[in-house]
Amino acid sequence: MRVTTGLSAGDGADIEFPDKEADPPRADDRATRRQWARGLSTRRLGLPSLGAVGAGLRDQAAAQLDRAFLWTPVAFGAGAATYLGLKTEPPALPLLIAAAAAVALALAVRRYAPSRAAAVLAGLVAAAVCGLAAAKLHSDLAAGPIAPAHAGMVEVEGWVVDVANPSESGARLLIAPVRIERLEPSRTPRLVRIVVPPEAVLGPGSAIRIRALLDPPPAPAAPGGYDFARDAWFQGIGGVGFSKAAPSVIDLAPPSWPLRWEMAVNAARWSLAQRLAADVSSLMGPRDGGATGLVVTVATSHEDWLDDQSRDDLRASGLAHMLAIAGLHTAAVSGFVFFALRLGVAAWPWLALRVPGKKLAAAGGLAAVAVYLGLSGAHPPAVRAAITASTAFLAILADRRALSLHSLAIAALAILVLQPEDVVQPGFQMSFCATAALIALAEVWPRAPAAAGLPWMLAALQRLRDWTIAMLAVSLVAGAATGPFSIQHFNRLAVYGVFANLSADFLAGAVMMPALALGAIGEGLGAGPALTAGPLFVAGWAAKAIVWLAHVFANGPHAQVAMTSAPFPALLISFVGILIACLWRGWLRVVGLPLGLAVALWPRPAAPVAWIASDGDDAAVAIAGQAVALKPGKRAYATQLWAQQTGLAQPADAAAAQAKAFTCDRKGCVPIGPARPALAAWWSTRPAPADRLAALCAHADILVTRAPVAVSDGCRAPVILGPEAFAADGAADVYAAAKGWRIVWAQPMRGRRPWSNPSGSGE
């Protein structure tokens, strides 16, 4: 028999016969015998023994010891998340003592224990305890007064610190109050956020007086929903308000120098936003397709010029990250500065021979990061991106790899030390999982040697092919890493997200952001239109193309898949799976892939059949797969969030859907349809007349009332929810039970924490 492989034995043939004249192997020479039999062995492969499996697992575990530092931010974040998930507030002193003891124990184990694995385990436990203590310490440092509930209309005097992103009701002013009517100075919040008419906006640094309806930061709109009050606690916001009147400018005593500095930076941002909006709008014309709003948003984080349709399209297409200054924008701006400086140094031979061009460019990139962070308002996503980018540039200055899992771990740990509450933020989870997944992809990506001798056209086509495949892989991997969090937190999955990100991110990173950086520098230096018009024109058309792409992908067939949130264990398993797939060294990292699908595949429990607002002043019922609100348009945002969480659609005509199921007036609603639960409501805080109460109770499975109802009043509704229940327990979800209805309240899920205290004291 002759086997032809196309190679001679000397060149590495696949099958090589031993020399017939060579001495046969000895019986005890096992290595040589295996070499003789390697080519033509027909032995059947069997399952490995338990001993071999155990040895393989031990080898896998031992290989992770060199990557122990990568798991340090994971352990620290687990400790911080544990603190945020507690139902009661722990005392600070025992946590600080425990952290000190854990660190001392870890150092002792490292010094005296013979096992390296024990030292690593002790170090990770110490990191987790330190994360728990750091989160508690940060919460105590953020503590401040909270506006009392039902404060009513009050007069507020203070300084405009910033113009926050607008709401559906109007523009928002972030105010540092000097005086609030009927509140003592010791009970005055450090910051309040007040909605004002769009035409009544005054820029940062203005001293104003305004009359507003003031409340504490709102609790979750539904059980398990987004807790704005917790974020407000860590941001120092102690109250929110609404005003229909324009603020008046007054004279106040000069503020403290830190506040003066913050207002000066924000005033410069607001001024730059106004100039950019005016210049881009004049260049693009009145029908700019959302370009002006997107340009101003990515430059200064002010969304005041972005129309609702463009914002909705960006979110629905999977491009919501365009609206928050984060990794993409910071990387594009600082990367542009880095490569421009490096090219400039290389183009000047005299300078290139005397300075390290790469390190000089890295220093310039660091400066660009700092400037862009100031322009962005230093919001949490921008801070995270700035720390990550700064870590990469510092690695270059220290002659280390700029992009590695090690530098990413340093950035994550730095962010968690400074802002431990970020660990539960979707932005933190999505950005770091996506970045880790991309670095892990780079580790395993095959690097074929460049073909030599190809004509330039074929070589160019080959490079284009490789680049296209790589970009598709990047979009797919990043989308897979962020998918579980998108489903869990936003209850939607963009079907065309990979293609939207592939095209829009390229336009943003390669065209819009570099051009905008040049234009913004010109605007900041006061350069005339002759120097700024060109870059801003390019940035405007790139922004218009991005918004157009968002509209196309958001309105394609079946563009979005709505999915309800999975139980918390599913999110935890997906998180662990992504971390294993990214951080583990060895073949066991494939175990992380099925674990990462837990959120998508986990069975969902039965959805609630009704929702009631935290003050009992609104409700919605699930009817034929739609969320029918009893007060259409009253709290559209809260109703939309509840429908999104439960997988319900919203009726095209909310008022018509309500009229088919309820008879309502200004004071209450009576159910008239066959839908269950039959929910009746009394909106007035004054007790209902006897005949009206009887009519409400006669048709109700559940009666929601803002006025007290006694059993002696004769109401026989199976479930009566009154003002005492809402004051104590907040919003409610109603579930169908075997016998009647089961009520799940929001407040017990939050626990008794500083930010969840309804008294407004923050204690």
Image (cartoon, rainbow, N blue to C red):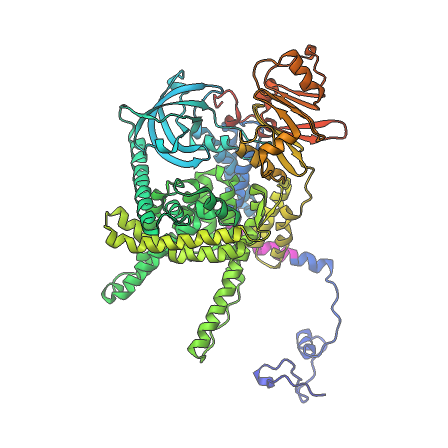
Residue 129 seen in this snapshot: no
Q: Position of residue 7 (x, y in %)?
A: 59, 84
Q: Position of residue 161 (x, y in %)?
A: 34, 32
**Dominant secondary structure of the magenta stretch?**
helix
Residue visible at 60% across and 24% down in the picture = 729
**550 relative to 86, above or below:** below
Q: Check the image and report above or below for 652 versus 477.
A: above
* Residue 452 or residue 152, whichever sits in front: 152
Q: Which residues are magenta?
A: 57-70
Residue located farthest toward the bottom when viewing the structure as drawn: 21
* Rendering quarter of residue 17: bottom right
Which residue is situated farthest in the top direction here?
A: 712
Which of the 4 image quadrants contains residue 698? top right
Which residue: 44% across, 79% down? 455
The front one of 60 and 391 is 391
In the figure, is residue 608 to the left or right of 328? right
Q: Position of residue 1 (x, y in %)?
A: 72, 88
Q: Total of numbered circles in the picture? A: 0
Is 196 within the magenta?
Answer: no
Residue 248: x and y, percent?
31, 25
| Left or right: 344, with 444 as reference point | left
Q: Is residue 212 visible?
A: yes
Check residue 58 for magenta coloring: yes
